[in-house]
Amino acid sequence: MADLVLNLKQAIRILRHPVDGFWELRYERRGSLGSAAILLALAYLATLLSEITTSFIFNPIDVKFVNPWFLFAQVAIPWVTWVLANYMVSSINRGQGRLVDVIVGSSYALVPYILFSVPLALLSNLLTIGESSIYQFFNYLIIGWTVFLFIVFVQEVHNYDIGETIWITILSLLFMLAMWVLILIFAGLCVQLIDFIRQLYEEVSFRG
Amino acid sequence: MPKWLRFVIAAVLVTGPWLQPPAAQAELPYRTFSYDSGNGQFFVQPAYVPTGYIGLNMVPPDVNGGPPNLNNPNDLFIDGQDHLFIADSKNNRIVQLDSNGSYVAAFGMQKGPGQLKEPNGVYVDEKHVYVADTGNKRIAVYDRSGAFVKEYKRPDTTLLPRDYEFEPVKLTVDKRGFLYVATKNGYQGLTVIDPEEGSFQGFFGANNVPFNMLDYLKRQVYTEEQLKKEITKQPGSVSNVMIDKAGLIYTTSISVDTGQLKKFNFAGKDLLGNRLFGAQTVFTNEERLFQDITVDGNGNMSAIDAGSGRVYQYDPQGGMLFSFGGKNEGFNKLGLFNYPSSIAVDSKGNLYISDRMSNLIHIFRQTEFAQLVHKANELFMLGRYEDSERYWQEVLHLNSKYYKAHLGLAKSFYRKGEWQNAMREFRLARDVKGYSDSFWQLRVIWLQNNFSTVVTSGLVLLILYAAAVKLWKKMKWRNGDGRPGAKSQTSHSNTSASG
């Protein structure tokens, strides 16, 4: 339990010292799958809360149309594919991170998003459309910070230099895209196959 | 009261509504919908219901008016006395009916210079009847008694391109008497003709050619020969034209991505702003085919889309009111069209829609719901928001989702300074700008009322923060941690990075 609290404290440390923070996460075992799971759950909660609490001006949808499952897919699918893509790409490019490290690191990189997206959503309730640039600025700041942490995570966990890091990040993103395309094609073919078998069965039962 | 009696009464009360005979109202063969500010489709109760048709045994056999039935009615016009003029193309005549639908006269039947050949369009003013005589490639003008007055042929000018064919299909005439003629495949726009000499005055209201990145790339990369092989892009053609009492000219266009309906002022500026009209989304094998537009006394526009067989009705600023009607998929019901060709509105607000394949003219009547919406919208457009409020409330009683009613109420509340209510209604109408504006007002008032509280609490918080920071530093120092110059124990050196 004390370990878990210590692991979660590491998230705050990563905000202030990202390079050291991720290094300790990997080589001093400051993070665990348990704390990663908590952070992921918090990330989903933050998405849900900010979707609900953002002012009508910046998110003009009805609260009753917020679909928690759809939001879950929106967060989970990119994250899971990123983890798989980054692990696979870096493991054949002399990266030192194990799958566990990639999972833990990718969760800790979400900390700015977890901490600041809900306060921003609450702040948006004080703003009008004329001040949308303030909202957008903070929005981009959160996204930029999170992306920055992901890049630092790749560098520190896999022990790359900066050039390698950028290259591996780009490769991971491309591989993510490739995965989605492949999954879509596979799903399409499966549907076709099922449809074919069903039609074959219908044809046979009709003749027989 | 005995228990069993109570039970019986309860049972009757519960099942009562189902025991009554079904309502006598006939089911309409189509659904009516509208779009909200966010372009979301929602269904509303019927706004227009079909009440009857014209077209069978319309011309009595004892007069020399030609065949009794219509054959390819392609244009309708309703004049100030609610007389209906029908361009009966395949019968080569214009039929005039009075407001009860009884036969008055037929134009262009007699042999001679006034004989018509496949007329496709008709326009009527106090003195004259103008006919787009497509088969004879001319505009024929009659007086109201049916006597041929004159004709306008292809203007004799070098300004018109040589391949320009003068085959008028629709026309309208402005107060000066200038003719605005839509020609077959008229991608140049409307041809404007001077009434005195019949000379060419220019083109009016042409569509633009769509241009995209791919075209740009082709122009950069292709050789001249390759470019010549490309199909020449032509702007969408103007399919119909009409003019209202104020002299504004309305057109419909086909093969365009936006600006299917246009409302031109005298200077030729489109007041509707080149928006998308008709269905928000169409399937790949369908297209928006706006064939005709009509404008009622309040400026509401009704346009007929032959692609979907639906009527789209808009307010004077192009805001969506209703869409109704549909394609005839073999049910042959009143209100469904095979190929709607024209639409006209009379002074009572009834819509007449001609179907050139079933050779009938369908008549639609406004429902109470549509009347309320029109009344409320009329007041709203005049800026009398407070007066319109009562009508919008009634509209909402009939349909709580109708977004225009929420918008009307919101503007009325805004005018009265009831910001909270305005915000609620703007939100229901999905109007972000209006919501933001009323919130701004509310925030200003709140700040004005609570200025001193805000500033004081801000100062108090600032002082507390400073004190806390000072205290924290002191505590840390006492614990022997965070001394100036000393490294914190929690920070870790990065020397093992070589591993």
Image (tube, coloured by chain):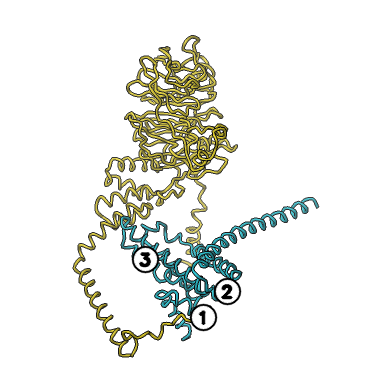
As drawn, the label of residue B481 is: none
If the image is split into quadrants, where does the N terminus of chain B sit? bottom left
Disc 2: which residue: A99
Residue A173 location, quadrant? bottom right
Measured as percent of width and height from the top left, residue B178 is found at 36, 21
Distance of label 2 from label 3 (alpha carbons) = 33 Å
Chain represented in cyan: A
User: In which quarter of the view is residue B276 placed?
Assistant: top left
Task: Identify residue for label 1.
Answer: A27
Marks 3 and 1, how far apart at CA: 34 Å
**Please, what secondary structure does the residue beneath circle 1 have?**
helix
Residue displayed at 42% across by 57% down:
A61
Of helix, strand and loop, which one carries label 2? helix
Q: Mark 1 and mark 2, same subunit?
A: yes
Q: Is residue A185 above or below residue A115?
A: above
Q: Residues within 10 Å of mark 3 (few under 14, many from 20)?
A: some
Instruction: Tell me which amino acid carries mark 3.
Output: Leu
Q: Nearer the viewer, mark 3 or mark 1?
A: 1
